[in-house]
Image (cartoon, grey):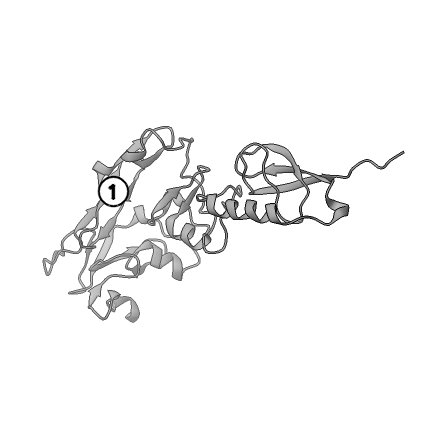
């Protein structure tokens, strides 16, 4: 219990109370195991089970150590525990300038301003208003895991982006993935504009040639970008889609020229 009573910090050098996930001046009591934690993510990192944040009823002020019902202000020292408080989500967040709003239809709080998002009934998720008419609308679109880190996107506090193939991924995970691959980790579609790379491949093929015994062979290919099948000249590495000119293709078979009778 001694460690639980000690204040925890979002930034110890600056003496900003909280944890790596939030700035906050109070700990909450996890009903499942009676442990005082700064937030549910800290609890889940330490324990072998998940914390039900909606069951939280008690908090402990890290300034005066008073245990009390969950609220935005300490009943004893009168300090404000967090700039943002949501009784529905049992959420305290003291991040300066941080925008947070509660969506009743999602049933949770979201990062951002309510004016910047709308709840899409088709997706059953909050979508940036600038993508109202252009987002790929799919039922329960957020009820999936990030394909890189595996976190449940419907419960994530990180920024989520929808890539060109309409799959969802954490923005930070996407940037990390782009360091090693230009393909979607789920469907292998190109993640960004590939004109420069595909142009370089085209120029390379124009000045190179295959060994004579392979020149008349044909590859049957599938394109990861347009999802169509076509035929291309056989090559050890590169095959151009006959439909959209992408080189993001996979070989599904090779045809050899017929031998003379």
Q: Residue furthest right?
A: 261
Q: Does residue 25 sit above or below 232 in this rendering?
A: below
Report the residue at 35% width, 55% height from top: 41
Q: Which residue is mark 1?
A: 88
Considering the image in quadrants, where does the C terminus appear?
A: top right
Locate residue 237 relative to residue 93 in the image: left or right: right
Q: Position of residue 115 (x, y in %)?
A: 21, 36
Task: Examine the rendered structure and indicate whether residue 119 appears above or below residue 148.
Answer: above
Lateral position of residue 228 relative to residue 190, left or right: right
Name the residue rendered at 42%, 31% in the picture: 138
Element type at mark 1: loop
Which residue occupies 50% across, 52% down?
Answer: 181
Residue 248 placement (x, y as % from top left): 55, 43
Q: Residue furthest front?
A: 207
Residue that appears at 77% across and 46% down: 213
Snapshot quadrant of residue 82: bottom left
Q: Residues within 10 Å of mark 1 (few under 14, many from 20)?
A: few
> Could you say which is closer to the camera, residue 181 or residue 157?
181
Q: Quadrant of residue 15?
A: bottom left
Image position, residue 135 (x, y; %): 37, 33
**x then y, percent, for residue 26:** 21, 59
**Which image quadrant for residue 66?**
bottom left
Q: Quadrant of the N terminus?
A: bottom left
Q: Residue furthest left?
A: 78
Count of number-bearing discs: 1
Viewer-proximal residue, 5 or 208?
208
């Amino acid at each position: 219990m001694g460690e639980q009573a000690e204040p925890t910090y979002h930034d110890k050098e600056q003496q900003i109370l909280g944890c790596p996930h939030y700035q906050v001046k109070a700990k909450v009591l996890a009903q499942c195991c009676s442990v005082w934690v700064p937030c549910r993510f800290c609890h889940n990192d330490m324990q072998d089970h998940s914390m039900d944040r909606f069951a939280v009823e008690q908090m402990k002020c890290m300034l005066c150590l008073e245990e009390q019902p969950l609220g935005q202000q300490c009943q004893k020292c009168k300090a404000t525990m967090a700039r943002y408080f949501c009784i529905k989500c049992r959420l305290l967040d003291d991040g300066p300038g941080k925008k947070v709003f509660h969506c009743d239809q999602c049933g949770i709080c979201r990062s951002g301003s309510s004016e910047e998002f709308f709840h899409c009934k088709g997706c059953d998720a909050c979508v940036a208003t600038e993508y109202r008419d252009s987002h790929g609308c799919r039922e329960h679109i957020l009820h999936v895991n990030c394909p890189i880190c595996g976190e449940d996107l419907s419960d994530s506090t990180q920024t989520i982006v929808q890539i060109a193939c309409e799959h969802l991924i954490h923005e930070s995970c996407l940037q990390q993935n782009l360091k090693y691959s230009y393909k979607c980790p789920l469907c292998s579609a190109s993640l960004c504009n590939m004109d420069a790379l595909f142009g370089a491949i085209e120029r390379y093929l124009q000045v190179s040639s295959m060994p004579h015994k392979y020149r008349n062979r044909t590859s049957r290919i599938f394109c990861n970008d347009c999802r169509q099948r076509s035929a291309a000249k056989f090559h050890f590495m590169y095959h151009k889609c006959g439909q959209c000119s992408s080189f993001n293709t996979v070989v599904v078979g090779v045809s050899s020229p017929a031998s003379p009778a």
